[in-house]
Image (cartoon, grey):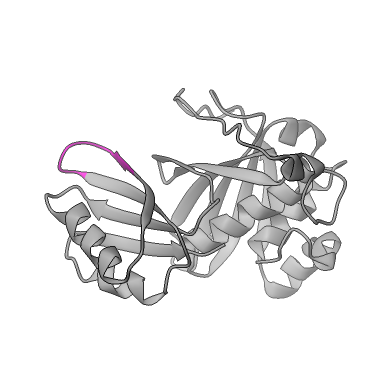
Amino acid sequence: MEIIKERDVKIRMDISIFDVVGPIMIGPSSSHTAGAAKLSRVARLIVKEPFTHISFGLHGSFAKTYKGHGTDKALVAGALGLSEDSEALADSFKLAKNQGLEFDFYEIELEGVHENTVKMTLTMLDGSQNVVVGSSIGGGQIEIIEINGFVTNMSLQLPTIVINQYDKKGVISEVSGILAEHSLNIATMKLSRTGKGDRACCIIEIDGEIPEEIEQEIMRNKNIISVKVINI
């Protein structure tokens, strides 16, 4: 079994009574169905490019009950871009086959994570892979805890920008300036890096919808590797 190194994972507890009741969804469980579909749908939004295969490593409760709760069908549905309330969720395996998307499931043991956690490995058209690890934390809420080895702890409660960059002086300042020019207010900003002056991942949550052109403007900086805008 594959082990992810132990790390601190902040589990969000700010769940309202409406979250406890649960979101509008198809399926028996907000955590195992709605949350699962949202996790893979967000993973699709994070990579944005077409992928041919997605592998789901299921941890904890996900691994034990994924067939009975429809977690497997929900995960495939989200990877196809279907929302958690889509009536097509139950037919996701058939839809994936029709669209040429291959998938598989396996059990995995991860350390220091929520019991409803999945490691999603997406194989792109060129053979490269992107890895997104996320948890369904209840009431349909999720948290993306890792992207390609970077600790992220994204709640997706707000529109979010995911920036893959080189850890160089002035990059964050320039990005902040671009957002200010568009009158976009930064709610939170988190930076994770592999080492000083190496590669880094910056997660920015914004108070309000983010225009798609922001991606191109930020990409003009030579130290930016990729930018993904997620309005969800």
The front one of 227 and 155 is: 155
In the picture, the quarter occupied by the C terminus is bottom right
Task: Choose top left, top right, bottom left or bottom right for residue 184.
Answer: bottom left
* 98 over 117 or under it: above or below: below
Q: Is residue 5 in the magenta section? A: no
* 12 over 97 or under it: above or below: above
Residue 155: x and y in percent read 53, 45
Instruction: Answer with left or right where residue 23 lies relative to residue 185.
Output: right
Residue 221: x and y in percent read 18, 66
| Residue found 44% across the figure and 25% down from its top | 7
* 228 over 64 or under it: above or below: below
Q: Which segment did they paint magenta? A: 190-198
The front one of 131 and 140 is: 140
Residue 179: x and y in percent read 30, 64
In the picture, the quarter occupied by the N terminus is top right
| Residue found 57% across the figure and 57% down from its top | 42
Instruction: Answer with left or right where residue 112 lies relative to residue 94.
Output: left
The front one of 23 and 50 is: 23
Instruction: Answer with left or right where residue 40 lies relative to residue 3.
Output: right
Residue 162: x and y in percent read 39, 56
